[in-house]
Image (spheres, grey):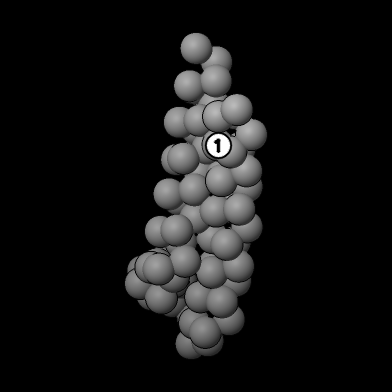
Amino acid sequence: MLQIILIIIGMLILLLGVICIFDARVITKRLFGFGDQNEASMGLKIVGFILSIVGSLIALFNIG
């Protein structure tokens, strides 16, 4: 039962990371009002990439 919960949590973290990668420009336009949105979107993409790696590793190591 705990394995299933950890797999679901890992998949949700992975989903959040992928959403951060693909919608980084839209999210930064909505949240931040300053002029240089390129740096904010790049930072959000990096955070999304790290989240997707962490989520996939959580799910991967709990399957076996």
Q: Nearer the viewer, residue 11 or 35?
A: 11
Q: Residue furthest top?
A: 1
Identify the residue shown where x is 45% and y is 58%. Answer: 18
Residue pictured at 61% horizontal, 53% vertical: 53
62 to the left or right of 17: right
Q: From what the image shows, is residue 40 above or below residue 59?
A: below
With respect to residue 52, does 58 lie above or below?
A: above
Quarter placement of the C terminus: top right
Q: Looking at the image, is 21 positioned above or below residue 33? A: above
Q: Residue at x 64, y 34 (%)?
A: 61
**Circle 1 sits in a helix, a strand or a loop, which is it?**
helix
Q: Where is residue 29 shown, x and y percent of the image?
A: 38, 75
Q: Which residue is mark 1?
A: 59
From this viewpoint, is residue 40 visible? no
Which of the pair 39/34 is nearer the observer? Answer: 39
Q: Position of residue 43 (x, y in %)?
A: 60, 71
Does residue 22 appear in the picture of this structure? yes
Quadrant in the picture for residue 46: bottom right
Identity of the amino acid at label 1? Ala
Q: Residue at x 55, y 15 (%)?
A: 2
Residue 31: give x, y in percent of width and height. 42, 66
**Across the whole image, how many numbered discs are drawn on residues?**
1
